Amino acid sequence: MEEKLITLRNYESMVDALFDQEVLRDNGIECALNNGDAVDLYPMFGKINDGLRILVFENDYEKALSILDEYKTLTTNEMH
């Protein structure tokens, strides 16, 4: 059975999307950017058609969200 790719998060910034993609990959989550070239070249497309998205396999969705939330919490606490 083929695994289904689903949207994990939408982004307006290529930098934010690439950063989250790297965090996920460092934690063993395969992911891909969708619509990245269009948003990078034409930032106004970020507001159209879900803009820039990170896609993950459906069975990794919950783990991926948890990894990003944990990372954000850790970095926020380190700043305070």
Image (tube, rainbow, N blue to C red):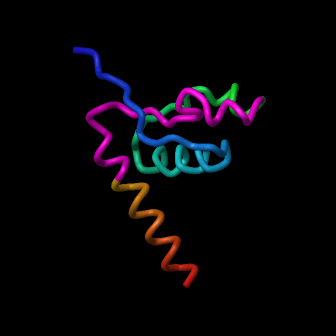
The residue lying at 40 percent from left, 41 percent from top is 29
Tell me the quarter of the image containing the C terminus: bottom right
x%, y% of residue 51? 58, 33
Residue range corresponding to the magenta coloring: 42-65
The quarter of the rendered structure image containing the N terminus is: top left
Please identify the quarter of the rendering in which residue 58 is found.
Answer: top left
Q: Is residue 30 above or below residue 80?
A: above
Q: Is residue 11 left or right of residue 62?
A: right
Residue 64 on the magenta span: yes
Q: Position of residue 49 (x, y in %)?
A: 55, 27
Residue lying furthest top = 1
Query: Left or right of 37: which side holds 18?
Result: left
Against 18, residue 55 (above or below) is: above
* Residue at 57% in and 43% down: 11
Look at 66% across and 42% down and name the residue there.
Answer: 14
Q: Residue 6: x, y in percent? A: 37, 30
